[in-house]
Image: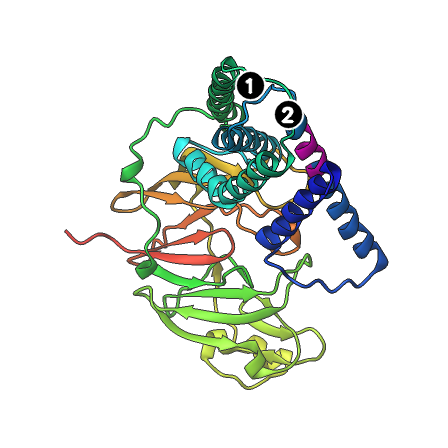
């Protein structure tokens, strides 16, 4: 078997290994001719590049540039492939990060994903070239081994320098944190009143002075001024959910909120459940007589102070909006009794349709009640009660 055929055979072995290593031997359902062409083109590119690389290593070995030692050849191939893979990963895949601990996680991910593949390819390529393609007619020069070992250390030094360089290139530029991070805590789940998990919008709260209750509406995401309501929650004077109403239990029609009344968009049906717990539809004139005072509450923006924003990554939403960063925000919230130190992680969670919706913190002190409310974004509410001494 001639050298060209052996080279192509080694390249085919590496192509098959690449397929099984990264794709798990999955069987593809090619739904279009274009998909087939792209797949075959990718395989052809890998095969050609691998063949050229094996041929180049063979040339260097047979011309005396590389010392004909199997272990040394495998080591040379390994450090070169490791360095090449790392450079591609660093420039193409490595995301921005906040600190060295986050950088360490990405380095670990790189090694976990590619180190074994590089090692196997090095053994197959280096061992195969030395055992099957070495045909040198030149005398072996002992100094060649020393030069090859020095080259390995040069590549390793370049690898270390590239790791340091990517750290400075990809590290997020931000003001130094001048707060004690351990003093800030996430809002506890034990104080969570409700969470829509991004499915619905939790509207601003309303207050019923007569019963000293809070009303919170969950609405469907919509760009309309008056949006259809999905559910209504009634919160008692102690900050607990006293009752709730699913609009779908009343009617199949869309209902909107109007000064405490739930009004049908498509008929004359009106529901007064928020005022009297009744689920029977009334006409508009009769429903108006049962209306009571309901007050929209306003957040106390002055009580909420953003202390620091720790950027951790580019927000995974809003294509092309590279200036938007995800991360953790640290807040001081001045309540009636205390100053809360809280942190809010993932301020730009993944949202439907790829838009970026910032999760802000709003505080409602509820002057006539013993507790306050914190709304996170438009998704969740937390009850803030005075701390017991």
Residue plotted at (67% across, 58% down): 225
Q: Which of 352 and 130 is in front in this view?
A: 130
User: Farthest residue toward the left?
Assistant: 389
The relative height of residue 376 versus residue 331 in the rendered view (above or below) is: below
The residue lying toward the viewer, choosing from 379 and 11, is 11
Contact (Cβ within 8 Å) of mark 1 with mark 2: yes
Residue 277 lies, in percent from the top left, at 46, 80
Q: In which quarter of the image is residue 189?
A: bottom left
Mark 1 → mark 2, Cα distance in angstroms: 9 Å
Determine which quarter of the picture holds residue 182: top left
Left or right placement of residue 215 versus residue 352 in this view: left
Residues in magenta?
50-56
The quadrant in which residue 267 appears is bottom right
Nearer to us in this view, 146 or 307 = 146
Residue 227 horizontal side relative to residue 387, left or right: right
Task: Give the crowd class for mark 1: few <14, some 14-19, many >=20 residues within 10 Å.
Answer: some
Residue lying at 34% horizontally and 44% vertically, measured from the top left:
342
Decide which of 12, 200 is in the foreground and name it. 12
At mark 1, the secondary structure is: loop
Query: Does 52 appear in magenta?
Result: yes
Vertical side of 31 occupied by 269: above or below? below
The residue positioned 60% from the left and 30% from the top of the image is 91
Characterize the magenta stretch by its predominant secondary structure: helix
The residue at which mark 2 appears reads as 136
Instruction: Give the labeled residue for mark 1.
Output: 140
Residue 204 badge: none
Circle 2 crowding by C-alpha within 10 Å: few under 14, some 14–19, many from 20:
some
> Viewed as shown, does residue 109 lie left or right of 373?
right
Residue 72 percent location from the top left of the image = 49, 28
């Amino acid at each position: 078997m001639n050298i060209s055929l052996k080279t192509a055979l080694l390249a085919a072995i590496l192509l098959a290994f690449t397929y099984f290593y990264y794709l798990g031997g999955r069987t593809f359902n090619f739904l279009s001719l274009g998909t087939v062409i792209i797949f075959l083109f990718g395989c052809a590119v890998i095969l050609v590049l691998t063949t050229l690389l094996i041929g180049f290593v063979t040339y260097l070995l047979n011309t005396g540039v590389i010392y004909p030692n199997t272990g040394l050849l495998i080591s040379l191939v390994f450090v070169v492939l490791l360095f090449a893979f790392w450079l591609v990963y660093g420039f193409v895949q490595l995301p921005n990060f906040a600190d060295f601990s986050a950088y360490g996680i990405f380095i670990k991910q790189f090694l976990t994903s590619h180190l074994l593949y590089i090692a196997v390819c090095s053994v197959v390529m280096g061992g195969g070239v030395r055992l099957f393609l070495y045909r040198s007619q030149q005398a072996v020069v002992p100094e060649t081994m020393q030069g090859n070992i020095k080259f390995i250390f040069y590549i390793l030094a370049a690898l270390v320098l590239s790791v340091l360089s990517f750290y400075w290139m990809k590290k997020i530029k931000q003001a130094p944190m001048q707060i004690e991070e351990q003093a800030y805590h996430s809002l506890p789940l034990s104080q969570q009143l409700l969470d829509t998990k991004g499915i619905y919008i939790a509207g601003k709260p309303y207050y019923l002075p007569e019963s000293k209750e809070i009303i919170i509406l969950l609405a469907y995401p919509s760009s309309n001024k008056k949006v259809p309501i999905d559910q209504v929650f009634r919160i008692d004077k102690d900050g607990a959910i006293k009752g709730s109403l699913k609009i779908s239990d009343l009617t199949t029609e869309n209902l909107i909120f109007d000064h405490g009344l739930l009004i049908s968009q498509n008929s004359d049906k009106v529901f007064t459940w928020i005022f009297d717990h009744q689920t029977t539809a009334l006409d508009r004139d009769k429903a108006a007589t049962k209306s009571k005072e309901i007050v929209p509450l306003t957040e106390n923006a002055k009580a909420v102070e953003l202390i620091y924003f720790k950027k951790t990554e580019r927000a995974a939403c809003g294509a092309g909006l590279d200036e938007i960063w995800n991360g953790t925000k640290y807040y001081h919230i001045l309540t009636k009794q205390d100053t809360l130190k809280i942190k809010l992680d993932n301020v730009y969670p993944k949202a439907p349709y790829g838009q970026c919706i910032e999760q802000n913190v709003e505080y409602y002190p509820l002057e006539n009640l013993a507790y306050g409310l914190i709304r996170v974004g438009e998704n969740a509410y937390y009850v803030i009660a005075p701390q017991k001494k």
